[in-house]
Image (cartoon, coloured by chain):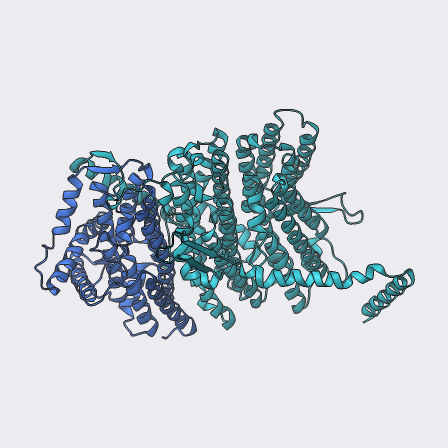
Amino acid sequence: MTLLFNLMAQSLQMLLVLALAPLLIGFVRKLKARLLRRKGPPIIQPWLDLIRLLRKEVVLADNASWLYRWAPYLIFAMIWVAASLVPTFATGLTFSWSADLIAIIALLGSARFFLALAGMDIGTSFGGIGSSREAMFGSLAEPAMMMIVFTVSFVAGTTQLSEIAAYMVANMELRASVGMALVALLIVAIAENGRIPVDNPATHLELTMVHEAMILEYSGRYLALIELASALKLLLYLSLIACVFFPVGLATHDAGPRAMAIGLGAYVLKLAIGGGALALFETSTAKMRIFRVPDFLGAGLMLGLLATLLVFVTRSL
Amino acid sequence: MPLYLALTSVGALLAVSVYAIVDRRNHHVSRNVYRLCIGLCGVIFLAAVMPRGAHVVSTTLPLGLPWIGMHVRIDVLTAFFLAVVNLGGAAASAYAIGYGAHEKEPMRVLPFYPAFLAGMNLVVLADDTFTFLVAWEFMSLASWALVLTHHHEEENRRAGFVYLLMASFGGFALLMAFGVLGGVGGAYDFASIRESTRAGWTSGLVLALAIVGMGSKAGLAPLHIWLPLAHPAAPSHVSALMSGVMTKVAVYGFIRVVFDLLGPPAFWWSVEPMTFGAASALIGVLFATIQSDLKKLLAYSTIENIGVIFIALGLALAFKANGMALPAALAFTAALFHVFNHSLFKSLLFFGAGAVLNASGERSIERLGGLIRSMPKTAFLFLGGCVAIAALPPLNGFVSEWLVFQAILLSPALPQWTVKLLVPAVGVALALSAALGAGCYIRAYGVAFLGRPRSEAARRAHDPDRWSLGTMAGLLTLCLIAGLLPSLLIDTISPVAKDFVGGRMPTQAELSWLSIAPVAESRSSYNGLLVFVFILFSAYSARWVIHKFGSTRSRRAPAWDCGYIETSPMTQYTGSSFAQPIRRTLGVIAFSVRERLDMPAPGDTRAARLSVDIKDRIFDYLYAPLTRAVESCATGLNILSLLTIQEYLALVFAALVFLLVLVAI
């Protein structure tokens, strides 16, 4: 009975992140439009777009290889698995121990690997430019992320996300190192999701684009999968920030349906706050030049390193 | 029994060398030699993994120096490395059955190849200083001969020269290391070295000499300069052996000397391996990222991986010195796991590069492209190797990297400040090199295998023979197994860790669902199998939903590319343009890159030129002054060769008196 309940909670989480991810994108877009005094599309517009794309015929470039057709499924699957392993409304779900925080980051790395390869498959210069820049961002963002992982797991004494969340709930105190890790994580999250000021998710045909350049040749169901995957990635980062730094209201896996419902409500609220902050931030900044991005990410890396050193030097900060 | 089996097979390998010379007129000699090598490597592999009865088996053969004989021994560490060496050896031989058939001068490979294998096995088996050093030099010389296979090319001759120089330098350092280890009493066999005690500074000296000696063979920066020249110069199956296996023999030597012969460690021993390891990891991966020669790229990436292994070994030393058995076992296991992993995927990648080289005649990725269509099977297998070496889940490279990170996460408990502050820096280096490594392999695979073919040769390339493909597929399967079921390998390594760092990780097989947890499940755990199953399940369910409810139609059309039609495949992103962002952000520090743009004035019809000047700082600031110093010394001492006989006698007498005084003090 418990096992069944646990499995249900786990499947609920998988479907929940899938259902919420496009809505989060829609929410951010709506909010951005309202901030610019436009009416904006409805919040469910991303879902409608996805369904429309799924129904369309795929136009494949003449020389597209098997890798190009496999990649969307792999990318989607990897990010979906990663997103459903981050605690959203409850910790300690049945399979949460199958990958710790390092493995979740690495899964995102695998997805990036295949996305960058897919960008190079057709052999156009747009694809190459996107992949090359994605590889550069990745090689700075990933170490910064590792430093954040170091800090958080030194503080909590574990790399299991559920345990970290439990520790953070039990020891609510202000720590300089954790604060720095949070800022670093925000920087990494913005870069990894290709948001302003690193990349502009709304543009097309711009020489500075990164993510859009890689997926330029994709269409139909493949494009839908990749769009869904990138929505899931944004959701994953928000869940991660919420789970590690603001674990208020998180239920434990054996807490029963009532606590889980509270956790669910808290989670949706946290997503709304996170999405709102993102929309506000994006409307108030301009995109930076491509070669300013390494400085931006370098600041994230240095903050992460500083936080790690602080924890090494003294456990109390 | 296993020891005699192994020794007989090593002897038989030497006999195969002789056979290759004797039977050189036979058309099938190449095939026969490689088949015999597979068989003999297989036998030694079995000897390594078969139950040994006693924990340690050893014997003395009446060979070598008359009054001490030749000591050989198999313990857990030897057995592990024998297995790694011979797995790699068997794979290279199997690949070579197909690949070696294309060799234009087989007699420059066949006699040396079995000898090289025998030398590596003998280094691992040796249990006295003399045997170890002789086997070590034998291995160096055999591989040197193999590097010079294609000696007609100027570049390869230079590689051979640099290799010989570095190998003799390293051998010299080892000679002195063992001299100091043996002490004044002149102990030759490892058993009496193990029992003797020595002062702190002697241990430090031995450690430094061992780092220089073993590190120069393993490719530890800054002693790595020969490696990216020599490894690619050899035929590809030998490159695979040198990169995948010979560097591991050097790692074995380091472990044998530092963890075994040198006695209980002090905490500062860990500083050198960690510092040089971190430097190698970064230098290796940065240079790999800008290489356009596929085999050179792989060689530089070997330097990176050796760096990772030495980082883990350094951590193990630090933990061991502080009596922290479990973390020490974790770091040590991570190192050996990575040794095993790297021998698998680096061989796989070199085999792939060899297949590409054979099929297209090209080593430069700038003239390849689109191989995924002309060589689909090789492309698939090479992709697997790239995913594994880029440390991405669910393959095996990630598992060892993950274990190293877990060991780093246990390091705040170390009491010494030196190590405590060094470890986070090493952690950054490791994280950076892992991330850059992924970028490097995106570039290598993307430019060489994806896109449109940049040359006719790339368009016409085709998959290699069944032996080559089969070997690569076998290695990829092993990578997958090691990635999905790491608990098997960790439990295999545990006895080694128990003997050499005095602790062992919890038995992983007892955990549910085949997951691994280095310390405790509440601290960290990873389940490659489950993650893999989840990925497959999610991908298939997505496919099922789409095929059930969405459209499955697709149509081929010219690439869109924003409406712009690129006619020439040369307009694609090249390897150097792909590396440009990295070169620009990190290149200024790492390899003093200077880019010069010569832009003609408006109206001028001259073509614009962009020239990139990349310098190897280590070469400029370390080796160039060294070469100059040696040369000026040689010129200065030249007068000594023009003395009269009386002056020579006086010189010899003075030297004798000086030495006697030295001994008296």
Question: Which colour denotes chain B?
Answer: cyan
Query: Is residue A91 toward the left or the right of residue B631 in the image?
Result: left
Residue in front for this viewpoint, A224 or B176? A224
Please provide percent x and percent y for residue B308.
49, 56
Which quadrant of the rendered structure holds the C terminus of chain B? bottom right
Please provide percent x and percent y for residue B34.
59, 32
> Is residue B638 depicted above or below B345 in this figure?
below
- Quarter-of-image position of residue B619: bottom right
Residue in front for this viewpoint, B583 or B425? B583
Question: In the orientation shown, which residue stands out farthest toward the left?
Answer: A39
Kindly indicate which chain is depicted in blue in the rendered structure: A
Q: Is residue A173 in sight in this rendering?
A: yes
Q: Residue at point 34% right, 42% down?
A: A123
- Quarter-of-image position of residue A92: bottom left
Please provide percent x and percent y for residue B201.
66, 69
Please provide percent x and percent y for residue B207.
63, 62
Q: Residue at point 50% right, 73% down?
A: B417
Q: Residue at point 58% right, 54% down?
A: B225
Q: Is residue A253 in sight in this rendering?
A: no
Question: In the orientation shown, which residue stands out farthest toward the front?
Answer: B603
Query: Is residue A109 toward the left or the right of residue B319 in the image?
Result: left
- Quarter-of-image position of residue B651: bottom right
Query: Is residue B549 toward the left or the right of residue B324 in the image?
Result: left
